[in-house]
Amino acid sequence: MEKNYLLWKVKQQKKNYRSNTVINQINSVNEEEFFIPCRCTQQKKNESVPYTAEEINTDTAEDIHFPEEIVMNILSRLPVRSLQRFKCVSPFWSALISDHYFIMKHLNHGRNDLNSQKLLTANHQVGFNSFSLSSPVQVIEDEQRLDGPPNYSLSCCCDGLALLSFSDEKTDLMSFLLWNPSTRGSILLPSRHCGFRFWVFGLGYDATSDDYKILAAYLDAGSLGDVSVQILSLKSGSWRKIDKYPTGMRPASGYSDRAMSSLEL
Amino acid sequence: MVKLKSNDDKEFEVEEAAVIQSEMIKNMIEDGCATSVIPLPNIDSKTLIKVIEYLNKHINMGKAAETGEEDDLKEFDEQFVNMGWEELFDVIMAANYLNIHELMELCCQSAADRLKNKSVRAVREMLKITNDLTEEEEQEIINDAPWAFEGPEIDDTVN
C-alpha cells in the first residue's frame, strides 16, 4: 500500500497543467504505472503490442485447441484480476486480453452480469471501498478496501472508471484523476481553478467520437441559475467552455463526504 | 424425428422440437436438407450423447417458467457441466459447431469458473498451451500488476 501511495506522489509531481501534455501522457502509456482501460486509447496501445493477430495465428496455432472466438467467449467472463494474470499464459492470450475489441466485449459482459456489478464508496477518513451487489435482492456484501489515491474524493463513475477530484485550497486548483479500480491504473487530467465550491461532474462515453468526456458545471451560490459548463474530452485533453446548456440547472449530486456510484469490476 | 450421425458412425434419433435448438440443424430442416441422416463429422458419439441429453431436457425451456420447472432445469444444468475438462471442451466445440446458444453459454461459463482462480502454469497445462513468452516479457507483465499474481485463492492444481 505504501508503495502505491508513493506512486501517487510521483504522479503528483509529474503534474503538468498544459492541456496537450495529458493526451501525450495517455498515448505514451507508461506501462509501469498505467494500464489504460479506456476504449479511446486502445488503438495506440495496440501498436505497442508486439504480436499482431496474423503472427499469433501462425506461431501458436498448434497450441490453441479452441478457435479465438471461443477463447474470447470464455475469457470475457473472467474478472480483471484473472485477466491480468492470464496475460502471462502466452503471447496470444496477452494480445487478446489487451485487444480493443476484447475490452469492449468484456465491458459489455460485465454490464449484463449482476455478479460483476459493484458499489464504490469513498470517504475521506476511510478511503475507497467496493461492495458486491448480490441478486436479486440488492444486499451489500463482500466489502473490499481499495488502494486508492489519498485525499481525492469521488465525483462520478462510468463503465468501471471513476472520476476523482482533489481541491487544493492553497493554489486554488482542482486536480482530476480518472481511475480504474479494477486494473488500479489511472491517468491525471488537466486541472482547473476551483473558484466556486458548487461543482458538479459527469463522466460519460461518447460513441460518435469513441471518447470519454467529462462535464464540469458550477452553480454560483449567490445567484441561482448562474451556470458555467465545461467539457473535457480525453482525446483532446483540454477543457472547453459550453455556451448552450439547459437553464435552471441545480446540483443533483453535490459535495458530500460520501459518494456512491455503480461500478463494474 | 431427425437422425444425426456422429463421426464414429453411430446414429441417433432426436425429436425435431429438441434438435431445432441447434441453429445449424434448424436451418438445414428449413432448407429441406434434413430428409435423411445428418452427418456430424466434427462430433464423436460420446459428445453427441451429452448434447442430445441437454437438448431433450431443454426441449420445453420456454414453458419451464410457466410450469415452475426453472429450478429443476437449473439443477440439471449444474449437474450437466459437472464433467471432465476434456469432455467440457468437446461439448463446447460441438455446441459451437451446432450453434446452440444456451449450451454454449452454460459451458463457457463453466470453463470460466474453473479457470478464474487458476495459476498461469495451471492454465497452460489445462489448455495445453506452450509458453512462448520470454522471461523478460513475462516479468514485465508481472511487474505491471503484481497484485494479480499473489493471493491465497490462486490455485496451481490442474483439474
Image (cartoon, coloured by chain):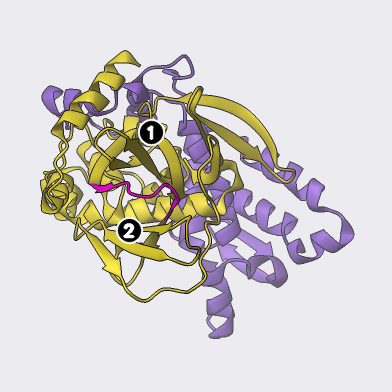
Chain colours: A yellow, B purple
Mark 2 crowdedness (10 Å alpha carbons): few <14, some 14-19, many ≥20: many
Chain to which mark 2 belongs: A
Chain to which mark 1 belongs: A
What's the CA distance linking mark 2 and mark 1? 20 Å
Give how far across and how far down residue A242 sits, in percent.
31, 70
Q: In the drawing, does residue B123 fall left or right of residue B17?
A: left
Q: Nearer the viewer, residue A247 or A104?
A: A247
Hey, which quadrant is residue B132 in on the image?
top left
Q: Is residue A68 above or below residue A12?
A: below
Label 2: state its secondary structure: strand
Residue at left offset 31%, top offset 62%: A231
Which mark's residue is nearer the viewer, 2 or 1? Answer: 1
Residue at left offset 42%, top offset 47%: A197
Which residue is disc 2 drawn over? A212
Q: In the drawing, does residue B126 fall left or right of residue A95?
A: right
Q: Which mark is residue A152?
A: 1
The reply to whether discs 2 and 1 touch (Cβ–Cβ < 8 Å) is no
Q: Nearer the viewer, residue A165 or A251?
A: A251
Label 1: state its secondary structure: loop
Mark 1 crowdedness (10 Å alpha carbons): few <14, some 14-19, many ≥20: many
Residue at left offset 24%, top offset 31%: B130
Hey, which quadrant is residue B41 in on the image?
bottom left
Give how far across and how far down residue B43 sits, in percent.
48, 54
Answer yes or no: is residue B43 visible: no
Q: Nearer the viewer, residue A36 or B110?
A: A36
Residue at left offset 45%, top offset 48%: A157
Amino acid bearing label 2: Tyr
Answer yes or no: is residue B31 visible: yes
The stretch of residues the image draws in magenta is A191-201
Which quadrant of the figure contains the N terminus of chain A?
A: top left
Amino acid bearing label 1: Tyr
